[in-house]
Image: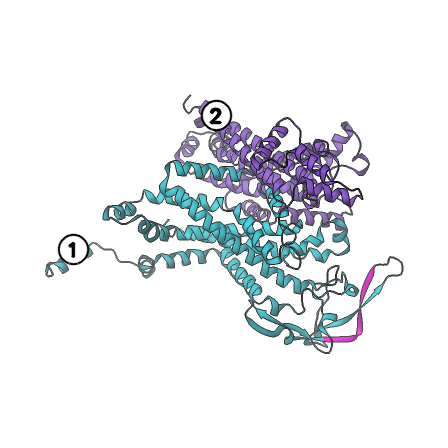
Amino acid sequence: MLAYIVRRAALAVVTLFAISILSFAIIQLPPGDFGTTYIASMSAGGASVSEGDIQAMREQYGLDKPMTVQFVRWMGQMLQGNFGMAMEWNRPVKDVIGDRLMLTVVVSLAAIIFTWALALPIGIYSAVRRYSIGDYIFTFIGFIGLAVPGFMLALIVLYVGFRYFDANVGGLFSPDLADAPWNWIKVKDMLNHLPIPAVVLGLSGTAQMIRIMRSNLLDELRKPYVMTARARGLSELRVIMKYPVRVALNPFVSTIGYLLPYIVSGSIIISLVLSLPTVGPLLLKALVAQDMFLAGTIVLLLGVMTVIGTFISDLLLMWVDPRIRLERR
Amino acid sequence: MSESMPIAAQTIEAPEEVMTEAEERISVATAGQLMWWRFRKHTLAMISAVVLILFYLVAIFAPALAYVDPELSEAQRGLMPPQKVYWLDDGKLSPHIYAVKGARDPKTFKRVYVNDPETKIPLRFFVRGFPYKLLGLVPGDIHLLGVEGAPIEESLFLLGTDVNGRDLWSRLMYATQISLVIGLAAVALSLFLGVLLGGISGYFSGTIDTVIQRVIEIFRSIPTIPLWMGLAAALPRSWSTQQIYLAITLIISLLGWTELARVVRGRFLTLREEDFITAAELVGCGKMRIIFRHMVPSFLSHIIAATTLAIPAMIISETSLSFLGLGLRPPAISWGVLLEQAQNIQALAISPWLLLPVIPVILAVLAFNFVGDGLRDAADPYG
């Protein structure tokens, strides 16, 4: 059990390292460095910058050092919570991201909860009542959910909401509350707005989950112990829920590790279409403006979030699956 | 020796039961035939296969199916809604359209377009139009659609126009070409990576296997879209359309090979334990011969199925990136580039037809999924 936790934790650390290198690469990839970008933005503002100033600044930020040194410096700053300056906003990256990162977490979590809450019962139903009309309908909806990319679904939802309900379904807050400080009214307002993004974001994941749950449970239901349980006169609900569902749940829990990066990815684009105040639109703006500190930080933080979530799902799997828990105790 | 043969054969034949004709057919069928029979039973997959063939025909003949140059813009014709085609004329089949007049609404300043019932323009098929080269090779100027008695770029707007007055139908044809080809190209690249790394991982096992598996796990736990966006945004602005095209293909396939590698490795692992591989090893076949002569043919069909299932993800990736404005850049036209114009609620409210490219995307993705599903079922005909 301990070996399992250590192994997963080690993998998480390695993944984090890989993500940090990639994020750093994203910061470094565009031609030129912070200095040239700074000159460009300053001269665009009408101010003139002398060559000496630039040189001083390069030294201050360590831009004249080799790549590896820069990377270590950057990582060190990151670990201290110093994410650098968002050039376009002229504010620390931390302030710019702040709330938005939290809202990204909220939206992603809501999508995952929605996915599970829907996929679990439907998966069980589809497996138990295989080839029934309900099964076919859910399979069909599942295929549509798989085939329609999230942002298109968001576009369609926007259009339908506008055309037939005369409502703007985008956003996470009512207009008059968007800039208000956090209080209960604002939280309630957010909860009211949350279902649509959660559904749009969670649908394709839900479709996948239903299929996984259905096929897992079908495999399980064929096994002799189910028949034994039934022969001994257990109620149908107990026969299904007590053992087969529990076993079928295993791969279900383990796939959350793959579901999470998928949903975080999706939230970026969907936020843009539904104009949600998450890090998605911010990342796009930063990338277009080549504001690389901001962009790199967002990519890194999203990666960190995903890795932590995956680790939690690993622990969850351990809790659900005694085979992992009891291995080499 | 030769005399005893028929006797031996007879003793074997004796307990044989009489086969029906169908059983006989199955028992002598090749693996390929069995796969085809099983695939044929999957109705949805068959329909989808036809849809895919049609899609690729559109991709090949895109310039002939378009009726005007997709880049031809005219501000006077901006945001024109799709045109209605009238099929009957006095009870006779004679497709025609009416000339469209644009005017500005004096109150809202919006451009409004009205049909001019006086000017009837008959539709013609297979007419000469702007010159093109099919697949960049075969020159031609025959187009599926045309009109008579009026310049086509001023009269025919089957699916309406975009903000710049470019014809959506013609652009959609070219977009289909690029989007489908980029899906194939990206999948070919990831297939190469996947088979190479998955094969190495599965065949040699041990430390190499562990390392490659961990790398795959790391790749899969990274949210792809932010990474794609980062990489795509880092492409120099000065690059030509072709360079961007190649780079985007590379970026998409770079992160898409993991699933294929997983499938290949799984197959290698199960096959390695099979008797016929052991037999080949005992007979003294070389490693390469075992891999390519004995192992690859027996899981080729699985690879084809997995590849088919990977294509829609590639298409969606390209569409998403271009939709964000980070993928292909104009003048390249793809489904994503077209959809970029339908990004916000204002655009949707004024010009909902710009959302039309959603339909081919969904259709193509669904079709690839169903065909992949059918292929996966058919891939193992003895199972």
Going by the numbered disc 2, the residue's amino acid type is Val
- The percent coordinates of residue A41 (x first, y second) are 74, 43
- Residue found 86% across the figure and 58% down from its top: B109
* Residue at screen point 67% across, 65% down: B70
Where is residue A120 drawn, in percent x and y?
56, 36
* For residue A297, side relative to residue B246 (left or right): right
Left or right, A38 with reference to B255: right
Which chain does the purple colour mark? A
Q: Which residues are magenta?
A: B106-121
Q: In the image, what residue type sits under mark 1?
A: Thr
Question: From the viewer's perspective, is the residue at label 2 or at label 1 nearer?
Answer: 2
From mark 2 to mark 1, how far is it between C-alphas?
A: 64 Å
> Residue at 32% across / 58% down in the picture?
B23
Q: Nearer the viewer, residue B142 or A227?
A: B142
> How many numbered marks have been drawn onto this rendered protein structure?
2
Tag 2 and tag 1, C-beta contact below 8 Å? no
Image: A311 above or below A129? above
Residue A39 versus residue B382 in the image, above or below? above
Dot 2 falls on a residue whose secondary structure is helix
Q: Which mark is residue A6?
A: 2
Question: Where does label 1 land, which residue?
Answer: B11
Answer whether residue B120 is magenta in the image: yes
Residues packed near mark 1 inside 10 Å, few (<14), some (14 to 19) or many (20 plus): few
Assess disc 2: are there few (<14), some (14-19) or many (≥20) residues with their C-alpha within 10 Å of its C-alpha.
few
